[in-house]
Image (tube, helix red, strand yellow):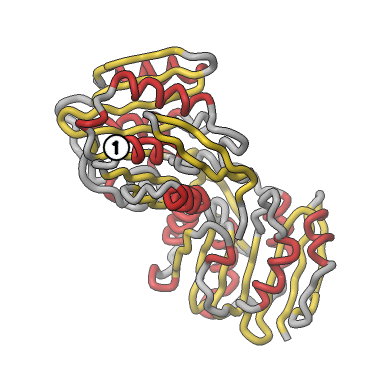
Amino acid sequence: MQFSNKQVTFRFYRQELRLALSQSLFSSFDVDVGSRLLLKTIAQEVKLTEVHTALDVGCGVGTLALALAKAMPHARVTAQDRDALAVAFTQLNAQKNQATNVAALGGLAFTGIHGRFDLIVSNLPGKAGEPVLRHLLAQMGARLSQTGRAAVVVVQPLAPFVAQTLAQQGSELLFQEVGKGHTVFHFRGPEAATETAESETAETLKPYLRTKSPFGAGKDALTISTIYNLPEFDTLGHHTALTLSSLKGQLLEGNIFIWNPGQGHLPIYVQRQAGTRLSSLTLGGRDALSLAISRANLLAQGIEATRLHLQHAAHILQANGRRYDWLIVYPDVDPGMPWEQLLLPALAERLKENGRLLITTRSAFAFRMLAGKPAALRLVSDRKKQGFRALLYQRG
């Protein structure tokens, strides 16, 4: 599948890189100014011949990781991103550039990653929220080798916060450069810093937690944890409200798959409505953070861990090919991807006979999708609300 909208070339350390970019990811038309500034300072300040292990946190399409890998063929470079599509692009670009010393992993920052690094880099996400940024900076300091350094770039409005945070955490500031719109910091963590138990846990959600949110799931009034970086932290969106109303009166049972579970409102509703009729609940999506908070909220509501499965995938067609009794989907609307033609035929193949598919999306997207309905699906209901449309199909 072709998610790339543009190919660009970029030079670093006398090496030319060819990068595929995506309109669905950060920096979709060129290598961004912040990454260029960060790499320039690394070339000036870091002895790359002495770097044997490097980590790119929040790798995007792999710009930083691949630049370092090509400049340091002797080093092992790890790239990580919570967005599975970003991981897929990093892997694709590594192949394009024959960077065999790069390993790209999906997940929240530092989860599943062990050991220490001579160099940790990151183009820090400006919208992550201060608690998350504070956590990232602390973990970087804790994961450095004895002589290692972290090098990060941040948009200018957040530079004072980063400087203050590094000072409060006891980090040693090695270098700083202010550019047009961005600031770069090179630092080393406190000598006593050690890896924490939290950093080893795949469900490290504490720095992401934002508030507790009331939520009505059928006849139950519940309170769930919500996080930064995802919508619906205090109020249900129109698309979720429409989905829940479309499921009222439906017999939810068997093996159920939900794509893009958000903060977990919909999965909890499905779990409550299905009750003992639920055989398994699979959550899928690009965003590891959404999957993690949804899983945590479901476990807090008492679902058995053996009935709950996660699929972190770049797109829905990459998810597990098994068949389900129910598919409940909030489609990703990626620019340039003909999802309107692809979704219904592909999802029809994932349904058991008489299984049901509920797709909630923007009305314009739904209108285009209706033109290509496969013969295997029968439209059961069609509901609209505030610019969204919920289409319920049955197979057979």
Q: Is residue 302 left or right of residue 362?
A: left
Task: For the C terminus, give its image quadrant.
Answer: bottom right
**Apparent side of residue 265 relative to residue 41 in the rendered image (left or right):** right
Instruction: Check the picture and name the quadrant holding the N terminus.
Output: bottom right
Neighbourhood count class around disc 1 (C-alpha, 10 Å): few under 14, some 14–19, many 20 upward: many
User: Which of the two residues, 152 or 134, is positioned nearer the viewer here?
Assistant: 152
At horizontal 31% and vertical 43% (from top left) the residue drawn is 77
Q: Quadrant of residue 136?
A: top left
Helix, strand or loop under label 1: loop
Q: Residue at x 43, y 25 (%)?
A: 153
Q: Is residue 181 above or below residue 64?
A: above
Residue 311 lies, in percent from the top left, at 47, 63
User: Is residue 303 or residue 31 the one in the foreground?
Assistant: 31
Badge 1 amino acid: Met
Residue 51 at x, y percent in the picture: 23, 34
Q: Residue at x 81, y 49 (%)?
A: 386
Q: In which quadrant of the rendered view does residue 148 lie?
A: top left
In terms of depth relative to the viewer, which is nearer, 101 or 124?
Answer: 101
What residue does disc 1 label? 72
| Residue 391 in sight from this viewpoint | yes
Q: Residue 261's x, y, as percent?
A: 57, 57
